[in-house]
Amino acid sequence: MGAMGAITDVPGIRVGHIQKTDAGWLSGVTVVLPPPGTVGSVDVQGGGPATHETDALDPTTLVGAVDAVVLTGGSAYGLVSASGAQRWCEENNRGFAVPGGVVPIVPAAAIFDLGRGGNFSARPTAEMGYAATAAAAAQKEGHDVGRGNVGAGTGAVIARTFKGGVGTASATLENGVVVGALAVVNALGLPFDQTKPEVPAPVQAATTTNTTLVVVAANAVLDVAECKRTASASHAGIARALNPSHTLADGDIVFCLSTGAVPLDRTDEAARQVSLITLQSAAADVVRLAILDGVASAEAVSTPAGDYGAYGAR
């Protein structure tokens, strides 16, 4: 494991959280702020995603760099918080250069937490996105990351009954590559015992109010297509941690960021494949650990099955 067991073990990665928990609020924003020039892509495998600017991360498109990743509550309404992160990036001259200025590339994804604090209209704003980005930028290199019911995990639940939240983990490979993950766990499924087969409990009244959001980061040199494949492989970590996963009622999504500091062994095709497979296998396991960390770090709050109270889906 990395020195702090956090996504910020990847040099240059910073994380900022902003949340509100009073006056009907139970929601927030988390921003992952990578160093300039970071390459990224994304893979969406859930059936009910709420996303912004994910098409720009396709390997066939013009732009390969990512300036920030926004994870937010508020379902599709909360995606407006990405505009605040974009404004911060523009003010700091971070973005795709165009005549007259820059256009920051800020993809975002949201969980459903509407009404969990009592007010359906209490959802993240552009100002909260700006504040979370500024909070990330103000952090020191290698800082620890807030876990549990913070940022986008403030109103998270799992199995529509128990508290979910933000978790993070990291691993350092023998070749010096550091792989980290941050997860916002708001899943339909529950963690399961991986030492024995398990039959999932019957799912009742499943609606698109569930999502696990993940950002994977590595200091390896990857191109956009390799980031895409790493994001796809990392979804295995969600499946290893939660049962069920990737359902029609989940918006499960993984972003992958490459800061490009450590070259992989590409002396021949066999070496390239081994390097990528090793990294992607580690990424999947780090995602699993980040999800379990998010569940373990959440408040010990639950309600009887079927009675969602202040924490359940509405």
Image: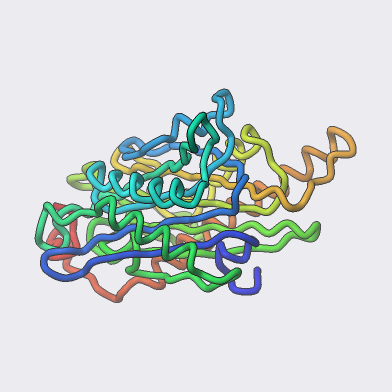
Residue sitting at 33 percent across and 43 percent down?
Answer: 250
Image x and y of residue 28, in percent = 29, 60
Image position of 81 (left or right of 26): right
Give the farthest residue toward the bottom. Answer: 300
Q: Quadrant of residue 164?
A: bottom left
Image x and y of residue 291, in percent = 46, 60
Q: Quadrant of residue 271?
A: top right
Nearest to the observer: residue 278 or residue 259: 259
Q: Quadrant of residue 252?
A: top left
Give the farthest residue toward the front. Answer: 100
Nearest to the observer: residue 9 or residue 106: 106
Image x and y of residue 184, in percent = 39, 57
Image position of 113 (left or right of 286): left
In the image, is residue 97 above or below residue 281?
above
Residue 202 visible in rendering: no
In the image, is residue 204 above or below residue 118?
above
Say how many tags the image has.
Answer: 0
Image x and y of residue 233, in percent = 58, 42
Residue sitting at 34 percent across and 54 percent down?
Answer: 129
Image position of 10 (left or right of 267): left
Give the farthest residue toward the right. Answer: 267
Residue 94 visible in rendering: yes
Quarter of the image containing the N terminus? Answer: bottom right
Image position of 83 (left or right of 106): left
Residue sitting at 31 percent across and 49 percent down?
Answer: 81
In the image, is residue 165 above or below residue 99?
below
In the image, is residue 60 above or below residue 201?
above
Residue sitting at 60 percent across and 70 percent down?
Answer: 142
Nearest to the observer: residue 107 or residue 266: 107
